[in-house]
Every structure is written in C-alpha cells, then in structure tokens.
Image: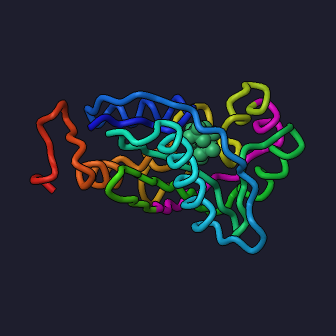
Amino acid sequence: MSLVLASQSPRRKELLATLGVNFNVASADIDETVLKGEAPSDYVLRLAQEKAMVIFNRLGASKNTVLGSDTSVIFQDHILGKPQDQDEFMGMMARLSGQTHQVMTSVAVISDKKISKQVVVTDVVFHSLSTSLLEKYWKTGEPCDKAGGYGIQGLGSLFVREIRGSYSAVVGLPLAETASMLLAHNISLWNESLNANDL
Ligand SMILES: Cc1cn([C@H]2C[C@H](O)[C@@H](COP(=O)(O)OP(=O)(O)OP(=O)(O)O)O2)c(=O)[nH]c1=O
C-alpha cells in the first residue's frame, strides 16, 4: 500500500515526512470557491476530500491511499483565504490584529476501502499589529501563499500572543490526528515500526 499526498504545499510535505512515512506527492488543482451558506468546517472538509478524490480518481483502481488537506483562517465565521493583493492583506490584518481567530485544518484520507475525514480547530490570539509592521511584512512575500495572510512558522511568528490547540495544524497538517488516520488505513509510520496495532 503506498501513500500519495495530494498537495502542492511545501509545508504539508515537510510535516508529513516527520511521521516517518514514505509517500509521493501529486498536485490537485480544485475550485476553492465557498458554496452559498456553507459553514467553514464543512468547507474545509469538502476541500480536503475533493483534493484527495481528484488524485485517487486520477490514479485509477490501484493500491494507493491518498491524503488531502485544507487550511483556512476563520474570523467571526468568515473564511479568510490567501490574500490576492496588499489591500486584501491589510484588510485581513485589520480584522485579526489584537483579536482571536480560528485556524481550521481538515484532513481526508481515501483508500479503496474507506474515506476518513476530520477537522482540527485551533485558536490563535494576535498582538496588536502596527501598519508599518504589516507593510514591511507584506514586502517579505511571506503572506501571499498562506491562508489568513501569515505564517506562524516564519516571520509571522511575531504576531502570535497565544495559541490553543495544534501548532502543526496551523502550519498545515495536524500531526497527531493525521497519524491516527493513517494507522487506521494500515499505513505504518516511524519507518515501518508503528502500525495499527499500536493505536
Ligand atoms: C495560518 C497558516 C497557513 N499556512 C499555509 C498552510 C497552507 O499551505 C496554506 C493554506 O492553503 P491551502 O489551500 O490549505 O493549501 P495550499 O494551497 O498551500 O496547498 P494544497 O491545496 O495543494 O494542499 O497556508 C502556513 O504555512 N502557516 C500558517 O500559519
């Protein structure tokens, strides 16, 4: 049984590798438009499943297990994706500055036997952020490929006063939850030494 990560995110690749599992990467391009009236947790779960399903179908009837994931930043029930330009970024930060938001990261694992999916919610509390700090942060290029416009693992770490929940989920993949899901799909971890019997 081989594992395929349906993602183009370098962060997810790095995080998954820390579980000591062999995998290939395939990029799933899907439409990420939010459906009318769709709740944030339903949205992130749907996207993770769609990313995994696109690759599962592309590989055809095979012995592959495919993992898809999605990270969105949620502020007062609004979904904040990746900022398209500086204005959108500044608008997002004006909402997040000095406030608490949620990072929702979903994981979907699909094999020929079953589909498992889960969403992990983490609270992140931001310091108050000055306009000059944010203008300089935008210029670094870090915000543009990140949900909510910041990277907790990078220069954006300065913004974070407190986190309640899973750090790895904020970066892009909740490791403990992902490990349980992969073991349940009979994918061994820790270089083949950890398997479903250890759950
Ligand atoms: C909040 C936050 C998000 N992010 C990243 C994680 C994800 O890569 C990205 C959210 O976008 P996603 O659409 O979840 O992922 P992606 O487009 O990078 O990759 P793919 O869809 O192919 O899996 O934001 C950080 O790296 N650090 C953070 O602190």
Quadrant of the image containing the N terminus: top left
Relative to 72, residue 137 above or below: above
* Residue occupying the point 45% across, 37% down: 5
Judge whether residue 46 is colored magenta. Answer: no
> Which stretch did the figure color magenta?
119-136
x, y percent for residue 27: 57, 32
**Direction from residue 45 to residue 109 in the image, left or right:** left
* Residue occupying the point 15% across, 46% down: 195
x, y percent for residue 171: 51, 42
Quadrant of the image containing the C terminus: bottom left
Q: Quadrant of ligand 1?
A: top right
x, y percent for residue 190: 19, 35
Residue farthest to the bottom? 37
- Closer to us: 60 or 133: 60
Judge whether residue 126 is colored magenta. Answer: yes
Residue farthest to the front? 61
